[in-house]
Each structure stands twice: as C-alpha cells, then as structure tokens.
Image: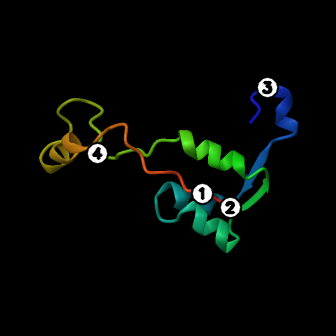
Amino acid sequence: MGSQRDDLNDPDLTIMMNRSDLNAMMAAQADLNGMISSGKVRLDGNVKVLADLRSVVVEFNPVFQIMPGTVTGQAIADNAQADPFEQPEPELIGE
C-alpha cells in the first residue's frame, strides 16, 4: 500500500460504493462483506490491501468514556471487564 503522492494515480485497491451504502455501513446497518457479496460494493485491484487495512483497524466501543464521569451504571461495569486491546480477528476476503 503506497503512501507517496505519486501512488495516487495508481492505487493498489479501489473500493467503489454508493454514498447511501457507505452511510449504512458506518451506522452498522450493513456490513462490508455482505455488500461485496451482493455486488453493492466493487473492489478493483489487490484485495489483500483490504485485509491489511482491516488488520490494523480497531473496533470502536460506543460506551467508551471519553470524559471521566460521562458513562454510568452497567456500561462502566461492562467496560471494566473488557480488555481494551482485545479485538475480533479480521475477516479475510478474496483469498
């Protein structure tokens, strides 16, 4: 995966989808694998790049206390028991 400005004209992978599908994915109403399987998302290039990207992305916990004292009750108890560095194994596609 390139990071130099010259690489912008020759990307390793291009992901194409409608904005409405991206919004649904960001709102956890749809998942990327399902949209790829259904044809709503098109991948053009080296699919391994997507697996590499997934391996470094962490799953955000929406009840994470950004400011101390902003989350109370059961959410704090649930977070206290969770390992903050534990992440689900990324799904590999296209291999």
Front of the two marks 1 and 3: 3
Where is 17 relative to 58, above or below? below
Proximity of marks 4 and 1: CB atoms separated by less than 8 Å: no
Residue at the spot of label 4: 63
27 w.r.t. 76: above or below: below
The residue indicated by pointer 2 is 18
Report, in whole angstroms, how far the alpha carbon at label 1 lies from the one at label 3.
26 Å
Residue linked to disc 1: 22
Circles 2 and 4 in contact, beta carbons < 8 Å: no
Q: CA distance from mark 3 to mark 4?
A: 36 Å
Number of numbered discs visible in the structure rendering: 4
Q: Which residue is mark 3?
A: 4
Residue 47: x %, y % from top left: 73, 53
**x 20%, y 43%: residue:** 81
Q: Quadrant of residue 87?
A: top left
Label 1 neighbour load within 10 Å: few <14, some 14-19, many 20+: some
Q: Position of residue 28 (x, y in %)?
A: 46, 60
In the image, which is nearer the foreground, mark 3 or mark 4?
A: 3
**In this view, the mark in front (2 or 4):** 4
Helix, strand or loop at mark 4: loop
